[in-house]
Image (tube, grey):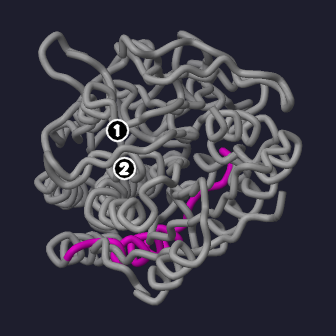
Amino acid sequence: MENMPFFELEFDKRAKLVDPSEWQSIEQELKDQAYTDIIVLSHGWNNDINDAKDLYNGLLKLVQAELDQYAASNRKFMAIGVLWPSKKFADKELIPGGAAGLETYPNKAEVINECKKLQEFMDSKSKLIIQDIRKALEKDAEADDISKKFKNLLESIRGTESRNEDTMPSVDLNSLNMMLTDDGFWTEANERMGNDGVQGIESESNNEDGVVPLSLWTGILGGVQNILNITTYYLMKNRSGEIGRIGLNPVIHKIKEIAPEVKIHLVGHSFGARLVSSAVMGERAGNEVVVDSLSLLQAAFSHYAFAKQFDGIQDGLFRSVLTKKLVKGPFLITHTHKDKAVGIAYAIASRIGSQVGQAIGDENDQYGGLGGNGAQKTNESLKRTLLASGEVYDFETGKVFNLNSDKYICGHSDIVKPEVAGALTSAFLT
């Protein structure tokens, strides 16, 4: 089959289209050509747009190869790549392929520079607070003073959240102090996978007690960088949801108006998985949109997001995606405990509310992630395995397929794989 056309759709941090002509080009293409299928992709955390474009280009090439193998001549695909302003964690060790090692200590200039970068992603109130933090670092302020400023910053972000299973916990000042000084903030020296969850970081340079700090570096600067990571995590979580609900959802509605018979497939990586899930839900009841498949690749949000009464009372935030049957075809979730970024992000996030456990980030932890564990407490979910390219899936409609990806996905961003493309293509053609 012929190569699929690709279009970009860029949103700003307020979920507005950066260039309306991008949508106009898509609209005209839909009117001029009779497509059977549209793939909409969303990236997760990135340093720049080129990262996202590389992801889309690599993954779509593999999908195209799979489609050619299936010889689906009766199907005509186009693809849309969503671009949105997102930021990686400051700590490269939390990003697969990052160059930083445990022996690398951040210096003050590096941490202050991360503060400046983060300001670009904040509203006016939070921006003023982080400017205050930056000034305190420049003056070598006491840890207690920095902790109080960070508490104000995190609470300002928390105040914008809706209450759900993925909400930031109440910020505990003592926990922030521990993160800055490392006092009492120690964990086992190894990272355990499987049911043990993420408990620490691999290191050969343990102290006499056999432990290393979860903050990766000793000293206040290491703690500051980890709290910046927490801030980044919740900012990007909130933003991805907003762009999905307010930005992408209306676009999908317009596509369905122009081409009501077209099949729509949403694919999201990392926070992009939250973005596409939010797009299905819409801003409010009545704004939902039905799609033909939904694929969440190493999703960086709660493993209870689709759960029924995850705490015995509340449903997950995205539960109605299932109860309202908003996904007509297969619903895929790749997950692996090799995904350090999702596991560690949740492990650290749990610490700010003084939540301490022996198995942080595993299937039983409140702060476990979809990318680590798959959908939990979700009756519709089935346990499956990501298969080798060319193998056949038994995907059903109305079910959530937790695809254990330990064999093929070795890190959070390690998704441009023939095996991932094979699963996606099978979902598209089911």
Element on which disc 2 rests:
helix
Compare residues 64 and 402 and report the one nearer the observer.
64
Element on which disc 1 rests:
helix
Q: Is residue 189 above or below residue 283?
A: above
How many angstroms separate mark 2 from mark 1 (CA)?
6 Å
Q: Is residue 412 covered in magenta?
A: no
Q: Is residue 63 left or right of residue 200?
A: right
- Percent from the top left, x then y, of residue 42? 52, 58
Q: Is residue 130 visible?
A: yes
Q: Quadrant of residue 165?
A: top left
Q: Quadrant of residue 50?
A: bottom right
- Percent from the top left, x then y, of residue 372? 53, 27
Q: Are marks 2 and 1 in contact (CB under 8 Å)?
A: yes
Q: Report which residue position mark 1 lands on.
A: 349
Number of numbered discs present? 2
The amino acid type, in three-letter code, at marker 1 is: Ala
- From the image, which quarter does the C terminus lie in? top right
Q: Report which residue position mark 2 lands on.
A: 230
Q: Is residue 208 visible?
A: no
Compare residues 340 and 242 and report the one nearer the observer.
242
Name which residue lies at 67% across and 30% down.
202
Name which residue lies at 66% across and 17% down.
394
Q: Is residue 116 left or right of residue 175?
A: right
- Percent from the top left, x then y, of residue 171? 18, 42
- From the image, which quarter does the N terminus lie in? bottom right
Q: Earlier in the sequence, mark 2 or mark 1?
A: 2
Compare residues 350 and 178 and report the one nearer the observer.
350
* Span highlighted in magenta in the image: 102-123
Q: Is residue 89 above or below residue 390?
A: below
- Percent from the top left, x then y, of residue 356? 32, 21
